[in-house]
Structures are given as C-alpha cells and as structure tokens.
Image (cartoon, rainbow, N blue to C red):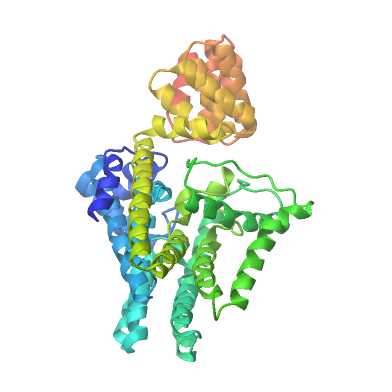
Amino acid sequence: MAITFVVYAPAVRDGFVFDDRALITDNPMIHARDGLYRFWFTSESPDYRPVIWSLWWLEWRAWGANPVGYHVVNVLLHAVNAVLVWVVLRRLKIPGAWLAALVFAVHPVNVATVAWISEQKNTLSMLFYALSILFYLRFDDDGRWRWYGWSVAAFLLALLSKTAIVMLPVVLLGCVWWRRGRIPKRDWLCSVPYLAASLALAVVTIVQHQRALGDVVVRTGGFASRLAAAGWIPWFYLSKALLPVGLTVVYPKWEIDVSRWTSYVPGVMLIGGLAVFWWRRKSWGRPWLFGLGYFVVMLFPVLGFFDQGFYYYSLVADHWQYYSIVGVIALVVGAGKRMSDRFGERGRTVGVVAGVALSLALGAAAWRRGSVYTNEETLWRDNVNKNPGAWMAHNNLANVLLAHGQAAEAIAHYQETIRLRPDYGNAHYNLGIASFQRGDYNTAVVQFREAVRLKPRSAEAYNNLGAALAKAGQTNDAIAQLKIAARLAPHWDEPRANLARLR
C-alpha cells in the first residue's frame, strides 16, 4: 500500500479531467439533498450504479470541488485492491502472489483507472468483486454458508458499483475448477443467484445505454464486424499488459474489413490457443487455461458485442482491463517464480532481482503516466501527440485552449477535428464560437449553419447562428434563426433577449 501511494503521488495532485465534472462536481443530483434516494429508487441517473453514485454524493459533501480528496480515495481503493489480489492469489496457491499483486498495483495501464476520478467506479467495484471471490473461496474451504452469503452480498455491491463485473459467476466456477480439477454439482447450484443478479443488472445496463445513446450510431457494421473485432480486442489488451508503451486515452478506432478472411485470424488464434490449453489441461496447459481464460472472460463485456458511448471514439480503453489484467500478471509472475525455483538458490536470487527490476520499471512508468492527468490540457496534448487521428481529443484540447484565451490554436484543432470527422456537429458549433470571439462573423455563420444542419434540435446552435448573422448585418435571417431557438427552448431567455435587441 505504501508503494502504491508513492507511485501514484503525481496522481493525487491531478485535477478533474474528461467527464469528472459532468458526473460529479457539476451533477445536480450529486448536489441535491434527496440525491441518495433518487440514485437508488429512480432511473434519473444515466446508469443505475447507486453504490458509486452514493460514494460521490458523500465525497462531494466532504471535498466539494477540490480534486485532492477524490484522488486520495481512489488511490486508497486501488491500494486495498492490490492487497486483496495478493490474498486471493495466495488462497488459490498461485506462485509469486505477493509480487503479482505489487505488479498490479504499479502497472501503468491502471493509471487510467486510478488517476481518473470518475473511474472510482472501477476501483470500488473491484473492491467488492475481490471480496466476493475471497468469501467464496472461504466457503469452498470450510463449507460455512455465512461465507457464501457474504460473497453474494459483496457481488451485489460490486454490480451496483459497475456492471462490468457481471462475469464473476464464471470466474468463481473457474476458481473451483482450478482448485479441484472439476466443478461439483453444489458449485453449479450455488452459481445460480450470481447468474440471476448478473443477468438482471446486465439487462438494466443495456437498456440504459440504449436510452442514453438515443439516435447516436456509435458503430456501423453488423454482427460479422463485431465478431471480427472481438477477436482483435484481447490481443490489444494483452500487448498493453505485457508491454505498456504508447498508452493514451483514445486509441485509433479500427476499421475492420469483414470481407477479408484475415480479419478473423486473431479470433481463430485466440480460440485455438484456448482449445490447446484445454486439451492439455491436466498438465502444462492448466495454468495457461486458467490465467488467459480468466483474462478473456473478464473482457467479455467490452469485446464490442454490446454498444456503449465510448465506442463512438474507440473500441478499446486502458481502464476496461482493470479487472482482467490480473490474469496475465499472475500467469507471467507465476511462470517466472516456477522457473526461478527450478534453479535453486541462485535462480531464486535472479528471480528476486528480476522482480525488483520489473516493479521499479513499471512503477516509474506509472509515475510518469500519472503526470499526464494533471489537467485537461496535459491529457489531451498527450493524446493528440500519440494518436493524431483522435478527433475527440483535438476537439477537447481546443475547448481547453479556447477557455484559456488561446483562440488561434483552438481554431486549428477545431479545424483538424472537422477534417477528421466532418459530421461532428459539436466541432462546427465550437469553431463557430471561436470564430465569433475573434470577430470573424462570416466564418461563424458558416460553421453555425453546418452545426444546425447536423444538430437540428440544438437551440444553442440556432441562437448563436442568429447572433452571428446579426453581427454580419443579416438582420432578417438572424430574427428567423432566433425564433427557431426560442421555439426549441421555450424556457430559455437568451434567444428572446437577442430578438428584443434586434427589434
């Protein structure tokens, strides 16, 4: 835990980034006195995750708009999770459990979870998820049903923090298989409550995501495209787990040609590898099947079969492998421990040196990565440097620059956003705002017209188009646009105020 806090010292000093403010500090339900009731007993929140919403509701009252408190809580949760990973792996008799937990604690891929405040939903759900596994293993050891009850309760709390852990029932059965070489009937029956809870919360999450997305198309292509992508995604995450370089927020969004048979090769290789490990499950294939099988199972919710908003930008994200990366780490560290033990005392010495070197290298990389989350500008500059095609990163960086009065540089990034994504209405709207602020009213009119074409229900776009037309001397057209804005937002006073000034 001490090492974790040292490694994440830069993260504690970070600010709010990405959706932190929208979800927490600027969220009216977080501020509301009856927020807890509404999170638990209504569907007003964008996702039904009442446990994490409740934590943020309490934190807002403790820290307010000061990010330090939120970061300290997130690092603390991650440190406790690392300890729980150690305890669970030790109970499963995985070689090198302590080192595996330390590698999990300092792995730079996890910076995306620990330094990003809104990803407390990852660290909090992981806490209950790991406790649920630990309690079930205790139940498996001594047969006391109270441990089973605690396990089910912890699982429900994990689900109500983030539903990405819905695959826990499969994980529990896998742990029993790892211990016994088979899955007794009792464990199959005991998995039923977990499966029922997973199914119920998964359905709720899918419905809420569809409601939140509305008419937004986050992905094109049919089932064949999703199936091909699902074969690529685990290999991407495996590469980042083994060689965590080039980490960023928004990775390139793959364009997979489903008409080419090569698009399915990664998936076939993945299934083929797991099949070989299953075939050799009674000998050398057993740890590979357990470790990589766990890795793939926990990635299932983010393999692309079910849409979510982030797919609009990319099909992969570092914080989505927070749970699954444990499988790869435990497999690699366990294999290293076994190899070093075979060479006696000298081998164990080499193993210790290698473990220290690995931890130092990963910890240093995590330290540097934590500094990237200092503020919005450092985060998005890092992203556009590593992935110049990330149109969302260009747009977000431009928003920061415009807020800081750097309109010229902001306009360049808005223009790059539009070049990369011509149908992104927000970029046209933002470029219109920037042009308006610089007094370039003709360009502002052009951009606002494109914005209302792409976002015909946006009262803000019509209002600003009217304001730009008025500045450009096109009064009659300005009045027409402002009337549309007033009709779209009848309770918004600004379009009416602008109309009054023109009349």
The answer to which quarter of the image holds residue 423 is: top right
Residue in the picture at 54% in, 51% down? 239
Kindly identify the residue that appears in the image at 23 percent across and 46 percent down.
Answer: 69
The residue positioned farthest toward the left in the image shown: 62
Which sits in the foreground, 253 or 447? 253
Percent coordinates x, y for residue 205 in the rendering:
50, 61
From the top left corner, tell me how far across and down residue 282 is, in percent: 55, 81
Residue 60 relative to residue 386: left or right: left
Q: Residue furthest top?
A: 473
Q: Nearer the viewer, residue 162 or 444?
A: 162
Relative to 284, 111 lies left or right: left
Residue 348, quarter of the rendered image? bottom left
The spot of residue 355 in percent (x, y) is: 36, 56
Residue 153 visible here: no
Query: Which of 100 and 33 lies nearest the eye of the viewer?
Result: 100
Q: Quadrant of the image for the N terminus?
A: bottom left
Picture residue at 35% right of the left edge, 67% below the top: 97
Displayed quadrant of residue 224: bottom right
At which x and y percent is residue 165? 45, 65
Is residue 330 shown to the viewer in this render? yes
